[in-house]
Each structure stands twice: as structure tokens, then as C-alpha cells.
Amino acid sequence: LKRSEEQPSCCALCQDVLRDPVSTSCGHWFCRQCITSYWDQSASSGDSCCPQCGERSRTSKTVHLNTSESL
């Protein structure tokens, strides 16, 4: 089983229902706006880390779109 199939129902950053959900390369899920804002505020060196596990991603381009629309 892939980690990406285990999509939670809420964002780890805002603790609200996922809106426009995206997953990091390490498999954690966030609202697109939440992770974008987090990386805008915290990434000054060009490296972006997962707020949940701290795994480094090269850029925010490692975020994967959720292709299954469930709304």
C-alpha cells in the first residue's frame, strides 16, 4: 500500500477539513493554502520541510495534487 492512499480528513496545520488537499513527498496531507503559506514563511534557503516530520523537500513542486475529487 502506498502512503498517499491514506489521506486523512483534516489538515495537520489548520486542524480543519482539508481544502484543495495536497500531499508532500513524504506522504503527509495539507490544505494547499496552508502548506503554501507555511513554506512561504519558513523557507528562506530554497529548501522546504514537511511541518509534520521535518523531511526536506527540494521545493514546493514536490507537492502532489489529489486527483480524486471527492466533493
Image (cartoon, grey):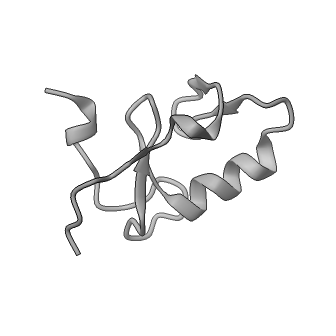
Where 4 sits versus 54, above or below?
A: below
- Can you give x and y, in whole percent of width and height, for residue 29 in the image? 41, 48
Between 23 and 11, which is closer to the camera in this rendering? 23
Between 42 and 60, which is closer to the camera in this rendering? 60
Between 58 and 53, which is closer to the camera in this rendering? 58
Identify the residue at horizontal 76%, vertical 51% (top origin): 40
Which residue is outermost to the bottom?
Answer: 71
In which quarter of the view is residue 17 placed?
bottom left
- Answer left or right for 27 relative to 42: left
Q: Quadrant of the C terminus?
A: bottom left
Where 63 sits versus 57, above or below?
A: below
Q: Quadrant of the N terminus?
A: top left
- Can you give x and y, in whole percent of width and height, for residue 8 in the image? 28, 53
- Answer left or right for 58 relative to 19: right
Where 45 sits versus 38, above or below?
A: above
* Number of residue marks: 0
Where 9 sits versus 19, above or below?
A: above
In which quarter of the view is residue 27 placed?
top left
- Can you give x and y, in whole percent of width and height, for residue 51 in the image? 59, 40
Identify the residue at horizontal 39%, vertical 65% (top origin): 18
Which residue is outermost to the left?
Answer: 1
- Can you give x and y, in whole percent of width and height, for residue 70 in the image? 20, 68
